[in-house]
Image (cartoon, rainbow, N blue to C red):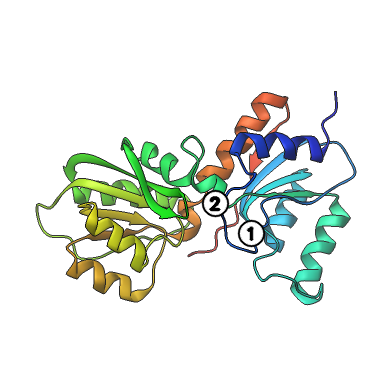
Amino acid sequence: MSLTCDALADYLNRLLDVAGHPDYPHAVNGLQLANREPVNRIGAAVDLSLRAVEKAHTAGVNFLIVHHGMFWDGVQPLVARAYERVRALITADIAVYSVHLPLDSSAEFGNSALLARRLGLTPTGGFARYSDVFLGVLGESDIPTTDLVKAVAGFATEHDSVIRTTPIQTGQRTRRWAICSGAGANTDTLREAARAGIDTLLVGEGAHHTAVDAEELSISVIYAGHYATETLGVQAIAQRASTDHGIPWLFVSAPTGL
């Protein structure tokens, strides 16, 4: 039985509890662009970029799940880059499904939760509160911080990302950690980390001042790359959709270097 883009989008909405989930005004979670043909191959990408669309088309994808969708700048004329992206999607008959914070906050499919498990860490609570949800995770451990840094560097390298860290002392150990993918280092998360007794914070990126603030708060920050830290969630939900519906899927890699 063929599966339409609307049916697959409804399935994903239920899986991720999208309805009513808090998010930024222009995130527009859910099906952002329909197509005409039944879904025959699912693609997962971090960003809705022209490069990702072209790679998806070459791979035979006609339903693309992304974390960063089409409308971050709000209402805008379909000219220049915006036109080229939409033209490429419609010409290739590729549907676009975007899911932002509902993905981040998922205990099963969230980027931070998956990254923790990838690094051998066990989440015991939520971190990075946004409205009434948590976008990250935290937990306890007792490992050399340099070992954690090496593990994160190995993961980041898979996505062409080079990590950075605030100063780490010789013999330092990570006993209470937190992870917030993407732009996870900001004034609010650092204050939250300090209140929670976090000694090591893993994020995608953060403004320069966060490194200064973190050092003064005695928090070590590992900046692992916005793109790299948000590759896991879209892959996880694409794989689940593939398993549940018998439709092949693939990851559309389009690293940004950031």
Tell me whether circle 2 and circle 1 mark residues in contact (CB < 8 Å).
yes
Residue found 66% across the figure and 71% down from its top: 73
Element class at badge 2: helix
Q: Is residue 203 above or below residue 231?
A: below
Identify the image quadrant of the N terminus: top right
Q: Quadrant of residue 48?
A: bottom right
- Type of amino acid at the residue the image marks with label 1: Ala
Q: Can residue 65 be seen in this view?
A: yes
Q: Quadrant of residue 79?
A: bottom right
In the displayed orientation, state which residue is furthest to the left. 171
Residue found 40% across the figure and 48% down from its top: 136
Q: Residues within 10 Å of mark 1 (few under 14, many from 20)?
A: many
Q: Which residue is more in the foreground, 9 or 35?
A: 9
Q: Which residue is more in the foreground, 84 or 157?
A: 84
Q: Is residue 164 visible?
A: no
Q: In this view, does 208 lie above or below 53?
A: below
Residue 185 relative to residue 48: left or right: left
Q: CA gap, disc 2 to disc 1?
A: 9 Å
Mark identifier at residue 27: 1
* Circle nearer the N terminus (2, 1): 1
Q: Residues within 10 Å of mark 2 (few under 14, many from 20)?
A: many
Residue 39 relative to residue 258: left or right: right
Percent across and percent down for residue 212 are: 25, 74
Residue denoted by label 2: 101
In the displayed orientation, state which residue is furthest to the right. 36
